[in-house]
Every structure is written in structure tokens, then in C-alpha cells.
């Protein structure tokens, strides 16, 4: 029997039972629509995390002192003094995969301007810091290497600090403020960055030459951190390895000794967060798949009813020459047609739902092409799988019994 | 000598019901020649239905010979039986068995859908011709619910004719119809028979037999009478004798 004839017969059966077919499809429609929408939400949040982290500087590499494992007592990373300016200089000299690098020292304190004061954190860095953090200036200018050499008492401040110590809307650039009773001249205001992914206010900062902070405020000779920027995102992992090697040599670590520092790239951070959101996606898809499964069972159910209801028709078809295989194909194609039509409607519904979520809830979404392809494939398989048994039952009917069935 | 369409020799059919063996047919022999109009009669339990199922290639005999148009039916597979039903037999049922909500012409086309040798155009043309033969050329697109019982049976007859079968096999084809309509249908059968179509009519109504050319009577699974009808009544004439309907 020609496949076209079979399609015609199956299509006819579907058209003759519009309401029932539509109700049957509903399970598939909802299943597919939720798979599409869930994946779009999952993909969307993954992308938004990636964008946020990239905005923080996706090639950024941070080097922090780790616990000194050589001594008997192990302190926390913050207390140890294993990272020094010498390390910074060694990395700067030897690594060829870094475009920018800055030492970082930081400490908390009170920013005071006349009667206004605000607790903030001061970061002692070099001028390359801005390029590493990908942050620009609203007004004023960055300090120079000369300021670093001279340990000049100049600072740049973030918008949150501006709002709190200059509440009257004065222009901060050129004004004198005090940080922990040491007077500084404000030479610039940083661009607003808002909160980062972790809810930290990125504008609540004071930036000064690291020499100034090291000597005049913290009175230390070690570094809290070294920040660097890999030439490109792709080079970041290799840069991490390179920096680790340099530091191990620098610290004269033996092969069996653990690192007394840690080097991390943003890439690692991204993958940590992506894996969280990936797990979420898997869960969402699992829920959606269950509804697809239920949709499939709905098809199976209705196909069984259909076979029962049309027993006499099957008997007649067999009497006029329909073979078992023809009957099987007829019902199988009917089931596949129902599930694929349901799939198409489901994709459309899923896309509209995604669009509405984006429009009204402002959730980031991203429709993945593969989710549509997978949904279609799953629909076809669902149709075959759940249509097979009822169709087999129809094909196995004895024409004599079927013809006499009332 | 005319061709033998059906050849049956010592045909037996047994059913096992639990531990008991029921002999539905106990060695039946007869043959049907091309152009005959045979009535197979018998009361309930005579083996008539079993005979019909075997004649229609829906069932297989336990032993004996059954040949249709020169093909030995015994030992054919299910699919081969389906092909024989499709190409050599035209079925007509008591309850018409038309597909609901499907137009007359589509109902008539049905057997040809299962014959891949027939193209779409040919299928339509043959269905049209068959419907014209039964006098329903004007009602191609009516669905069964829009047709009277007699008209529905005409559609079923057209469906039986559409595959140019070697034999039409009717099962109580007038059983659901009133006298007038059943005479009309019998007139049609006689007309088709005159055109050379072989008809086998299985029934328990004795008055149908007077319109056929031969009667085979079954009782308890055996043939008790097989006689030519030398006094064939014209169904058209009988129809004319009926009192006029009050319209």
C-alpha cells in the first residue's frame, strides 16, 4: 500500500475526531512547550551569568597567597605573607601570556569629608588595574607610575563613596578627603558598575597607588593579591599554569610540596556558575520530560480507544484486502501524526511563552535551536513508541471477529 | 464449457471449543461456474456462516480443497489471503459496513486503496463507474448518514464491484431492508448477474432463492439440496406487483 494513501487515511481519521485529537495532543503540546521554555530560561540564565562575569573581566587572573603548609600551624589565606612584591615582579618579567598585571593591597577604613563619613575599602594598585577590571572613569584621571613611585596621596573613588561623602552633589575631583585620618586628594571618579553577580557593590571602593596604601595605611611589606589579565580568554588557562610555575620556582617549592598560593582564572568561576545553572536546566527539563511522557501515555490511551471503537472498520478494511501491516501502519501513522502536530503546536506555544516571559518578567531567555530539534525527535519517537502497541493490537485482529463486532 | 470460479471438494471445518470438537462443515462439495447466481441457504447452525467465511477467504478449511479462480486457497498466508480478497472477491454485508462520515465515492474507493497497482486517477474513475452502475452517479459526495438504507447498500454493492472481482459474495444483503427496498436490491443483483457477474448470496430467507439461478441448502454442515432453479422470478416484476407506496 502506498504511503500517501496511508497518510490520507490517517489524516482523515484525525480530521473526523477534531476535538478528541486536540485533547490528546494537549499533553504533547504542554510537554514540548515546557521543554522549550524551560531550556530557554536555563540557557538565558547561563548566558547572563557569563555576560556578568565577562563584564568583570573575563581574562582576569587572581593570585592569592595560600596557607603556608611548611610550618606546623596553618593560618588562613588572609594572614599569610607569602605573596610579595618580588613575586609580582617575577611574574611581570617572566610571563608572556599576561597583558596587564597589578599588585593589590587592601584594607578597610573610614572615608571622611568634613562632617560626612563612610566606611569603605581602599585598594592599593597600579595604573593597570583599570584595564584588568575593565572599568573606566566618570571624571578626573588615573594616577600614574610616578605617583606609585612617589607613594602620592591621591585616590579615585567609586560612585557609592561619592554619594555618601559628597551628598550635596559637589564635584569630588580636586577635593581633599581623609582615609583613616590620612589626607588624600581625589583625582578621579570611577564609572558606575552596580552590583556584581554576587550582590557586592562594585562602586563602594577607594583606589590609590599600592605603595601609598602599603606604607602609609597598612604598614605592611607583603601583598594581599596580584591581579592580572591574560592576553585573551583562551590563553587564560595556560597563563594560570605559567604563573603557577613561576611562583613555585620563586618560592623554591619542592615537587612534593603543595602550592602556598592560589591562581584562579575567571574561566573557573564561570564554569562553577554554569554548572549550577546547568543542573537547574537538567531539573527543569526532567520536569518537562515527565509531562511529555504523560502526553505520550495520553496518545496510547486514545489510540487504544480508537482501535476498540473502530474494530468493525478494521474488520471491513481487512475484508476488502487490507493486510495486517496496512492496518498497523494506518494506526501508527495516525499516532505519529498526532504527536508531531502536537509537537509543532508545542514549539509554537513554547516560543510564545518564552517571548512573554522575556517581555513581562524580564528574565533572560535564549531559545536553543537544539531544544526544538530534540523536541521534534522526541515527539516522533513518542508517537511510534506509544502508537505501536495499539496499532499492533489492531493489526492482530481476526477479520471475522472484527466484522461481527458490535 | 464455462469456467469454474469456485471449486469445493470434501471441505471440512472443525472448531475446538474447550475439549469438544465442533464439526461445522462435514465434507462439503460443490462448484460455482462463471455467471451463476447461487443462493446458499440454511438455518442457524447449518454451517452457513462458516461456509461464507471460507468462501470469502476470511477463514481456512481444516481439510479438503477450496479453489477460487484457479487458486488453491488452503495453506496461503494471511497476507496472500488479503490479496485474494482484494482482487477476486466483492463483499456485501447485511449492515452495509460503510465508513461513517466518509463520502460514497471514498467508500467505494476503499478496496482500491489497498491495491498499489491502481493509480489515484484510475481509482477515482473506477469508483465513479461502479457508483453509476448501481444508480448512484448523482450522490457521490453524500455520506452514509445522508443516504437511505437501500442507497447505502447500493454504495456497498458499488464497493464490491469496484475491484472487478470474479465473484460477489453477499451475506444477508437484504436482511436490514424492507420488502420493497430488498426487491429493488435484488433487481440490481439480477441486472448485474445478467451482465455476467457471478453472485453468491448467503441467506436464510427462502424468497430470495426464487430470484437466483441455483440454490444450495446446508444443514448440519452438509449439503442436503443443490438444485437449479428453472423458474427464476424477475425481481423487477415482483417489485411492480407490490402495492404502490402512499407518498
Image: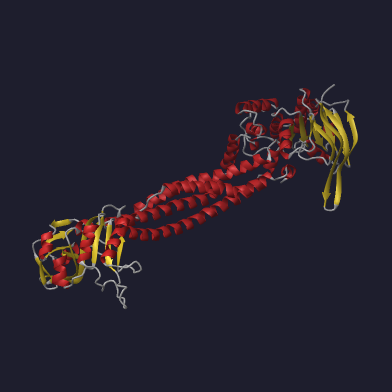
Q: How is the image coloured?
A: secondary structure
Seen from the viewer's position, the closer of residues A272 and B9 is: A272
Residue B219 x/y as whole percent: 89, 40
Left or right, residue A83 beside residue B196: left
Residue A237 x/y as whole percent: 32, 56
Q: Residue furthest top?
A: B1
Q: In the image, is residue A213 above or below residue A375?
A: below
Name the quarter where the N terminus of chain A is drawn: top right
Seen from the viewer's position, the closer of residues B87 and B40 is: B87
Seen from the viewer's position, the closer of residues A316 and A232 is: A232
Left or right, residue A259 beside residue A105: right
Residue B180 x/y as whole percent: 76, 32
Q: Is residue A169 visible?
A: no
Residue at x-position 39% and y-position 61%? A276
Q: In the image, is residue A102 above or below residue B127?
A: below
Q: Is residue A162 visible?
A: yes
Q: How many marks?
A: 0
Q: Residue furthest bottom?
A: A72
Quadrant assignment, res B221: top right
Residue A77 x/y as whole percent: 28, 71
Quadrant assignment, res B135: top right
Quadrant assignment, res A150: bottom left
Q: In the image, is residue A232 above or below residue B87?
A: below
Left or right, residue B80 beside residue A360: right
Amino acid at each position: 500500500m502506498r504511503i500517501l494513501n496511508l497518510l490520507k487515511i490517517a489524516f482523515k481519521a484525525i480530521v473526523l475526531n477534531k476535538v478528541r485529537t486536540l485533547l490528546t495532543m494537549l499533553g504533547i503540546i504542554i510537554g514540548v512547550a515546557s521543554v522549550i521554555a524551560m531550556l530557554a530560561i536555563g540557557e538565558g540564565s547561563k548566558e547572563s551569568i557569563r555576560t556578568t562575569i565577562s563584564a568583570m573581566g573575563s581574562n582576569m587572573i587572581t593570585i592569592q597567597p595560600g596557607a603556608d603548609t611548611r610550618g606546623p600551624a596553618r593560618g588562613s589565606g588572609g594572614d599569610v605573607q607569602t605573596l610579595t612584591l618580588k613575586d609580582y615582579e617575577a611574574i611581570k618579567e617572566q610571563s608572556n601570556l599576561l597583558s596587564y598585571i597589578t599588585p593589590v593591597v587592601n584594607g578597610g577604613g573610614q572615608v571622611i569629608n568634613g562632617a560626612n563619613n563612610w566606611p569603605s575599602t581602599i585598594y592599593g594598585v597600579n595604573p593597570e588595574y583599570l584595564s584588568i577590571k575593565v572599568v573606566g572613569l566618570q571624571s578626573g584621571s588615573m594616577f600614574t607610575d610616578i605617583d606609585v613611585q612617589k607613594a602620592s596621596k591621591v585616590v579615585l573613588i567609586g560612585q557609592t563613596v561619592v554619594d555618601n561623602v559628597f551628598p550635596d552633589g559637589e564635584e569630588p575631583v580636586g577635593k581633599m578627603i581623609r582615609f583613616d585620618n590620612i589626607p588624600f586628594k581625589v583625582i578621579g571618579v570611577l564609572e558606575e558598575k552596580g552590583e556584581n553577580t554576587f550582590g557586592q557593590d562594585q562602586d563602594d571602593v577607594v583606589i590609590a597607588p599600592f605603595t601609598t596604601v602599603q606604607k602609609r595605611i597598612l604598614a605592611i611589606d607583603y601583598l594581599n593579591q596580584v591581579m592580572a589579565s591574560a592576553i585573551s580568554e583562551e590563553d587564560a588557562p595556560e597563563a594560570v599554569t605559567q604563573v603557577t610555575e613561576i611562583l613555585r620556582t620563586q618560592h623554591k617549592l619542592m615537587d612534593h610540596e603543595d602550592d602556598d598560593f592560589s591562581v584562579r582564572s575567571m574561566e573557573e568561576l564561570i564554569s562553577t556558575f554554569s554548572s549550577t545553572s546547568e543542573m537547574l536546566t537538567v531539573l527543569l527539563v526532567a520536569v518537562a520530560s515527565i509531562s511529555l511522557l504523560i502526553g505520550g501515555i495520553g496518545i496510547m490511551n486514545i489510540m487504544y480507544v480508537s482501535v476498540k471503537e473502530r474494530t468493525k472498520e478494521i474488520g471491513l478494511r481487512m475484508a476488502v484486502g487490507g493486510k495486517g501491516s496496512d492496518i498497523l501502519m494506518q494506526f501508527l501513522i495516525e499516532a505519529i501524526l498526532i504527536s508531531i502536530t502536537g509537537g509543532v503546536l508545542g514549539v509554537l506555544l513554547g516560543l510564545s511563552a518564552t517571548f512573554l516571559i522575556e517581555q513581562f518578567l524580564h528574565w533572560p531567555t535564549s531559545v536553543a535551536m537544539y531544544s526544538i530539534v530534540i523536541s521534534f525527535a522526541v515527539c516522533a519517537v513518542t508517537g511510534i513508541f506509544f502508537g505501536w502497541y495499539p496499532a499492533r493490537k489492531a493489526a492482530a485482529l481476526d477479520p471475522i471477529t472484527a466484522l461481527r463486532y458490535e | 464449457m464455462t469456467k469454474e470460479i469456485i471449486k469445493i471438494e470434501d471441505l471440512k471445518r472443525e472448531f475446538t471449543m474447550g475439549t469438544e470438537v465442533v464439526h461445522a462443515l462435514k465434507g462439503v462439495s460443490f462448484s460455482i461456474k462463471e455467471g451463476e447466481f447461487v443462493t446458499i441457504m440454511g438455518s442457524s447452525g447449518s454451517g452457513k456462516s462458516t461456509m461464507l467465511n471460507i468462501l470469502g477467504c476470511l477463514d481456512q478449511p481444516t481439510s479438503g480443497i477450496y479453489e477460487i479462480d484457479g487458486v488453491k486457497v488452503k495453506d496461503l498466508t494471511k497476507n496472500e489471503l488479503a490479496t485474494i480478497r482484494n482482487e477476486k472477491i466483492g463483499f456485501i454485508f447485511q449492515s452495509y459496513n460503510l465508513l461513517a462520515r466518509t463520502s460514497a465515492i471514498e467508500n467505494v474507493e476503499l478496496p482500491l486503496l489497498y491495491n498499489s497497482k491502481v493509480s489515484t486517477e484510475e481509482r477515482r474513475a473506477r469508483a465513479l463507474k461502479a457508483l453509476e452502475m448501481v444508480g448512484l452517479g448523482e450522490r457521490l459526495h453524500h455520506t452514509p448518514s445522508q443516504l437511505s438504507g437501500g442507497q447505502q447498500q447500493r454504495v456497498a454493492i458499488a464497493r464490491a464491484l469496484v475491484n472487478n472481482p470474479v465473484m460477489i459474495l453477499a451475506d444477508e444483503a437484504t436482511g436490514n431492508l424492507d420488502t420493497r427496498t430488498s426487491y429493488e436490491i435484488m433487481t440490481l443483483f439480477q441486472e448485474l448477474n445478467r451482465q455476467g457477474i457471478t453472485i453468491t448470496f448467503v441467506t436464510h430467507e427462502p424468497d430470495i432463492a426464487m430470484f437466483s439461478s441455483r440454490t444450495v441448502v446446508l444443514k448440519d454442515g452438509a449439503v442436503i439440496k443443490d438444485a437449479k432453479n428453472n423458474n427464476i422470478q424477475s425481481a423487477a416484476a415482483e417489485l411492480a406487483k407490490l402495492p404502490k407506496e402512499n407518498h
